[in-house]
Image: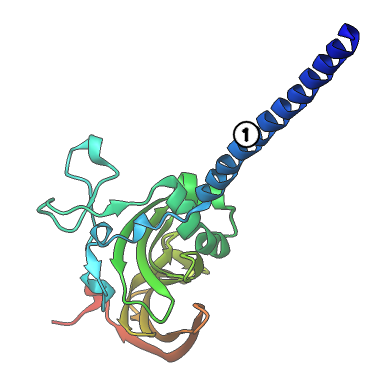
Amino acid sequence: MKYLNMKKIINLNLFLLVILLSVVSCKDKKKETPAVAHKDTTHAVDTSFLDDKNYIFQNLTDTRQVIMVFGRPNDHTTNNEVYTDSSFTRKYVPLTADQREKLIAPSVSKQLDVNSKYARDLMTAYFVSKQKKIGDLQPIIISIQGDDYGSLTMIILNKQHQPVDGYNLDGGMQPGPTDLGNAATMFDLKSYSKLRNREITTVRMDEIDYIDTLKRDSQIDSNVFKTLIQADGSFNTRQTVKAHFFIKPKNNSTK
């Protein structure tokens, strides 16, 4: 009789042990759920770069309004600081390395045939203007500098705040004077853009100086382009004007 009671006690203990292990297992599973949910929240998109405080201009209409003064004179500790004028009171906000890789690398990589690390590690960039939204599209304008490169570039962001396309409103590759055979040298004279809603008008001018200035005047090539921002955020550009005119060099001018 005592043996049977002992057996019942052992079976009861085993039954209770099984129940206890099941309860502990359920608690462990419940603890896993918040960890998985927390992991998913780390994919939130950082949109802080769109804060108005990052931009000197709001809805820029003419790139000739943008003046960039690089550093204070004789101050080697502020080489990366860029100001709006010579009073050195207002500074452009620089992009971080991650922002350069996200925002300008796609456009720069396409233009220069380089990988995204070039824009991230070897270029500098500054926020310039936040434009009015076009539907779900957000245009922003960024100043970009690199080796033989300087531009004022519009980047179009989609509603996920990812760059769709880029267009140089001013500048681009600037390798310096280009020799045209042995007779002339071409210089990038100037470029600028006017902006109105979806439409961009860009003027690019080059100067050709001939070696024999006593016989030939300098030639100015003026090219005008019309660019429309498409519904998908891409740029559609066509040339509308191609003109040439001539000027007399200073050492060949008549009094």
In the depicted structure, whether residue 90 falls above or below residue 171: above
Residue at the limit of the structure toward the front, as seen here: 1
What residue appears at the point 54 percent right and 65 percent down from the top-left corner? 111
Task: Kindly indicate the quadrant of the structure image that contains residue 58.
Answer: bottom left
Q: In which quarter of the image is the N terminus?
A: top right
Depth order, front residue of 95/209: 95
Residue beneath the point at 18% across and 82% down: 254
Q: Does the image show residue 108? A: yes
Label 1 CA crowd tier, 10 Å (few <14, some 14–19, many 20+): few
Residue in the foreground of this view, choosing between 139 and 50: 50
Q: Which amino acid does label 1 sit on?
A: Lys
Above or below, 80 against 26 in this view is: below
Look at the picture and state if 228 lies above or below 64.
Answer: below
* Residue that extends furthest to the left in the rendered view of this protein: 87
Left/right of residue 248 with respect to residue 135 in the rendered view: left
In-image side of 125 versus 14 (left or right): left
Pick whichever, 66 or 164, lies toward us.
Answer: 164
Q: In this view, does 22 lie to the left or right of 196?
A: right
At which x and y percent is residue 71?
Answer: 22, 46
The image quarter containing residue 72 is: top left
